[in-house]
Every structure is written in C-alpha cells, then in structure tokens.
Amino acid sequence: MNNRVSLKEKIGYGFGDAASSMFWKIFTFYLAIFYTDVFGISAAAAGTMFLVTRIWDTANDPIMGIIGDRTKTKWGKFRPYLLWVAVPFAIIGVLLFTTPNLGATGKLIYAYVTYTLMMMAYTAINVPYASLLGVMTANTEDRTSLASYRMVFAFGGSLLVVAIYQPLADMFQGIVSTSAAFQLTMVVIGAIAVLFFFFTFSWTRERIKPLKSQQSNLKKDFKDLLSNIPWFVLLGAGVMTLIFNSVRDGVAMYYFKYYIVDETAVAISKMTFTYSTLYLFLGQATNMVGVIMAKPISARLGKRKTFMYAMLGAAILSALFYYSGKEAVVMVYVLQALVSFCAGIIFPLLWSMYADTADYSEYKTGRRATGLVFSASSMTQKLGWTLGGSITMWLLAFYGFKANVQQTPETIDGIKYMISYVPAVGALISAAFIFFYKLDDKTMKHIELELESRRAKDAIE
C-alpha cells in the first residue's frame, strides 16, 4: 500500500482549510465589531453569547469525531462530510451576517440561534476535515508537509478574505444599506468556500484504516484518550495559543477604529483599503511565511523546541505593542509582521503533533480512534477561541467601551493592553506547556516503524 501523498492531494487538502479559515478570520476579525457597531448589541452581551454558544459548540466536537469514526461510505469516513455540509455551511454564514428588523431582545435571540447553527455547521465540516490528516498517511514527514500545506492555504484563505471583506462591504454600501452590504459580502465569500471544499473532497483519499481486529468500543476510545498524556500537554498549549491569537485579533479592528483612527490608505476604483485592512493583510502574509518556514526549522530543531521558541518570541514582541501607536505606525506594522511570523510557525506543528498523539495512542493501546483524537483536539482549539473571544468582549465592556463614540483615555489604554500584554501572557503559558511535551522526533520515528510493522502483519492475516 502506498502511504505517500501526492502534490495534488496536498494542494487539495489545503483548499479545505482555505475555506474554513475564510470563515474563521471573519469570525475573529469582523464578527465582534459587526455585532456592536452594525447589528446593535452590547459588547458584554456579545461576550456572554460567545461563551454560552461556544461551550455547546465545544461539546459537539467529540460527538462529531465519534460519528466520523463510525461512518462507512465508499468515499471513506471523513471525506463525505466535505461534500454534504459545504452548502449548508455557506448559507448559515449568510444568515449570521443578516440583520433582522427586530427589537433588542429579538436581535439577541436571533444572534444566539444563528451563531449556534454556524458553529454546529463549522464543527460538522471542520472536524472531519481535520481528522482526514490522520488517515491520509502514516508517514510523519508527509504529515508535517500536509499540515504545512494546510496552513499555507489557511493563511491564503485568510489573505483573500482580509483583502476582499471590508472592500466588498464598503463597495456594496454604495448600492444597498449597511446591513445588506455585509449580507451580500458573505454571499460572495460563502460561494468561494463551497468551491474550495469540493476541491478537497475530489482531490484527497483515505489510506489508514483501523486494524481488522479492532472492535468499535466508545468507552475504550475515551479511556485511551484520557490516558494520552502528550495529548493533554497539547491541549493546554493549544488553548493558550488560541487565547493569544483570538484576543489579539479580536481587538484589532477596535484598535484601529478608535485609537489609530482608521482611514483609507489605498483606493482602487470603488474599492478602498484602510490601514486596518493593510495591517490584517500583512499579518496573514507573514503568518504564511511562518507556516512555510515551520518544516525546515522544525527539521533542524525538532517540533517541540520550534514551537516553544516561537511562542516565547511572540510573547516578547506582543508586549512591545503597548509602546507603539499613532506616532509610530510603522513600528505597529513591523511588530505585526514579526508576531504573525512566530504565530504562523505554530499551527502546522500543532496539528502534526496531534496526529503524532493519535499514533502514540495506537502504539500504547493497540487501538486507533483518529476522529476522537482530532475532534477532541478541535474542541480544545474552540475552547481557547471561546475564552479568547469572550475575554475580548468582556474586557472591552470592563474598560468602558461604547460603540460608535469617541472613547475615554481609560478605554483606549485598555484596548492597548488587550493587543499587547494580554496575548503575551497567553503565549508565555503556551510555551510553558510545550516544555513538558515528550514526543520528540526520534521517539516518533520509532513509533512509526512499529506501527508499520503491525499494519503489515494485520494485512497478511
């Protein structure tokens, strides 16, 4: 059996995260400010909604992983969901950015319902997509390569959405109302995402299957996961990494609108590009450079050390953000590039290491539950995103933020803390967790060879 992955498959796999990341970045950069400044709910109410709905959504991830592990079709366990869920995913995205003609209570209920549906659809397509990495190949180098392609395409999708989201919304506002402009923007982005998911479904295939002797046993699968210490270490590191990212990204639009004072930097025909758009675009571009460098750097230093050093660098550079501002906008962009480069290195390593923990579990227990490992991993990622998103909105409320008015000096100072010291703390704690990760490259090579031997024997029997 050929376990190596072709270039076309790597590209096809990457398209899936391009689609997911387009929506993820919209949620991260634009949803909060859409809720407070366009939709019309308070920062505190939005923060509480994020927490409540995402806790439910977090619980859905292992459920989806369990369903994926037990799915049997001619296309495999995980690929079919990319075909089945893509269109509903896009439709719900449009509804999320639709502003109904309702009162304050009605709008809040609508936000709860549509955001919950959006997160459920995201889970239904993204958990199988993430799990697909664990069954495309057993080769650890190919996994890091696949994870790197995934992250390159993820940041490519992020670059695309950052480049077109605000300019499209501004252009549509010249034709329709502000709320309708955001809705139309999501129609365009949703259509692109559907196309990308279809590419992933068509261009990939599943190779790794559980041993013939393995019987479906959910209780044993959970027991194996709970005894997987390296997975728990990644859980802590992943949660704190997402808090670092989500707080920093979530406050960015507020930072530019209310502190830097966002203005048009470049105009091309009817599409305008503001300083914040260029800032976000620069971040995604240097994220991508970090992703590209993850494989060569980790090949030299190992995944663990590369992860730890990148997070330490991100922490120091983030803290320096507090001392930049209106008088030093160039420094803001320089720090954004450097922090984003460090952050970009992390994510291909993180998902490759999750695949390694699935192998470690099979090595120790003789059982494989790829969907459960990846869904539980996705669950922890969402937990970090949940906490980061809620912390962002609650801190805005704590510092006295009011939408669409001039902010007080105390609020501005709070926003500066939120883009600097708060994410820096998250990055430091993430580095501390990864210090205790024990699956180095030498250990994983031994595990890979042992599992190949077991699978070869199982194929003969």
Image (cartoon, helix red, strand yellow):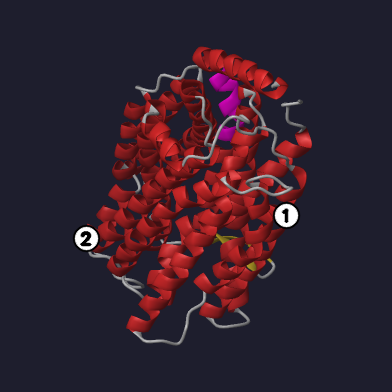
Q: Amino acid at mark 1?
A: Phe
From the top left corner, tell me how far across and down residue 247 is, in percent.
36, 50
Using the image, tell me which numbered label, if any, was put on residue 415. Answer: none
137 with respect to 99 (left or right): right
Q: Name the residue that disc number 1 marks.
A: 198
Give the class, few, some or many, for how many residues have Cα within 10 Å of label 1's Cα (few <14, many ≥20).
many
Name the residue: 55% across, 83% down.
177
Tag 1's secondary structure? helix
Magenta residues, start to end: 289-299
Q: Secondary structure at mark 2?
A: helix
Depth check, front residue: 407 or 431? 431
Image quadrant containing the C terminus: top right
Q: Is residue 330 visible?
A: no
Badge 2: residue crowd in 10 Å (few <14, some 14–19, many ≥20) = few
The residue at which mark 2 appears reads as 398
**Quadrant of the rendered structure where residue 167 is?**
bottom right
Q: What residue sits 67% from the left and 52% below the top?
A: 80
Please tell me whether mark 1 or mark 2 is closer to you in this view: 1
Residue 302 coordinates in the image, percent (x, y): 51, 18
Majority SS type along the magenta span:
helix
How far from the left and from the top, in percent, is residue 272? 60, 65
- Mark count: 2
Q: Is residue 443 magenta?
A: no
